[in-house]
Amino acid sequence: MCDAFVSPPSLLILRKLQISSSPYVSTSSFKPSVRSKYRSVHASLSQSHSNRWSLQGMTALVTGGTRGIGHAIVEELAEHGATVHTCARNESELNSCLKGWVDKGFEITGSVCDVSLQHDREKLMKDVSCLFDGKLYILVNNVGTNIRKPMVELTSKEFTTIMSTNFESVFHICQLAYPLLKASKTGSVVFTSSVSAFVSLKSMTLQGATKGAINQLTRNLACEWAKDGIRSNAVAPWYIKTSMVEQVLSKKEYVEEVLDCTPLGRLGDPNEVSSLVAFLCMPASSYITGQIICVDGGMSVNGFYPKHV
């Protein structure tokens, strides 16, 4: 029997959901007559095309889904038909988001969880297994943090905080989620990496190292879990307009420097990341695995293009 989440039952809902055994297959038993066969063939092709770009019938877990990119990912998956569970450390913030999602008609549940803590991770995955009857189609490892300091100034406590939040939690959640993803037979894991894993960024040395580790984990799982029908990919954003970077981007001169090294000349929006995440979870991307895709306005491939010669 599932344990109840410690939150108002009207918001943090835990119940058995009617999940289709295969989100790709129609259960219709309609047999067309000769007269209607051409029309039905066209309808069948349209249905097939529609299924390729849908998450209908799929279950998803998104960590850190109450803010920024995570919030956008939760809504994007739900809008495409997925039944989503998310988690966050802040209970009141989570409740507020859940209420808003209920008002929008989304099938989204949530639980309070600090993914940097082993016990919380284990409790989260037990709840997800119970909620989705042991079958998970989508896992989005989104939680991440940074402490902006030169590398030599980071304390051992700060090192532990970044490593446990950015990498240890991701690694362990993947271990715990593996049997659920395998049970779906068409599992998809998406990691939130960063351009800091590709290029050097000021005060991002340790954070970049954790994202580099995530990139290699993405590639390894793509190969190790392919036999189980599980795909593994990552998205690597540059500056996205979220609360996490508000303080850094509050300085006009700094923003101008960011824009100068970004070919598209602007910051990204959370939905420009979430749309890629949703695509990587769809049947339409079924031959894509082991890839880390930058969502950066061209920043990571930029050279030196002076505006004033």
Image: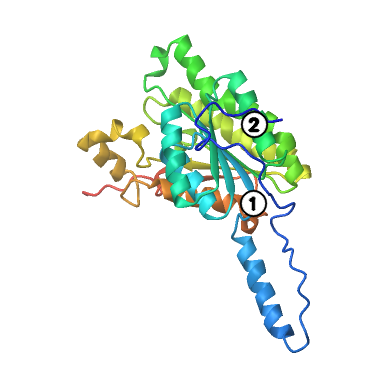
In this view, the residue in front, 57 or 309, is 57
In this view, the residue in front, 139 or 288, is 139
| Vertical arrangement, residue 306 with respect to residue 210, above or below | below
Q: Amino acid at mark 2?
A: Asp
Q: Measure the C-alpha gap from mark 1 to mark 2.
A: 29 Å
* Within-10-Å neighbours for mark 2: few <14, some 14–19, many 20+: many
Q: Position of residue 185 (x, y in %)?
A: 75, 47
In the picture as drawn, the residue positioned furthest to the top comes out as 156
| Vertical arrangement, residue 87 with respect to residue 151, above or below | below
Give the label on residue 127, or none. Answer: 2
Q: Is residue 220 visible?
A: no
The residue depicted at 38 percent of the width and 24 percent of the height is: 203
Is 280 situated left or right of 206 in this image? right
In this view, the residue in front, 76 or 128, is 128
Q: Amino acid at mark 1?
A: Ile
Give the label on residue 288, or none. Answer: 1
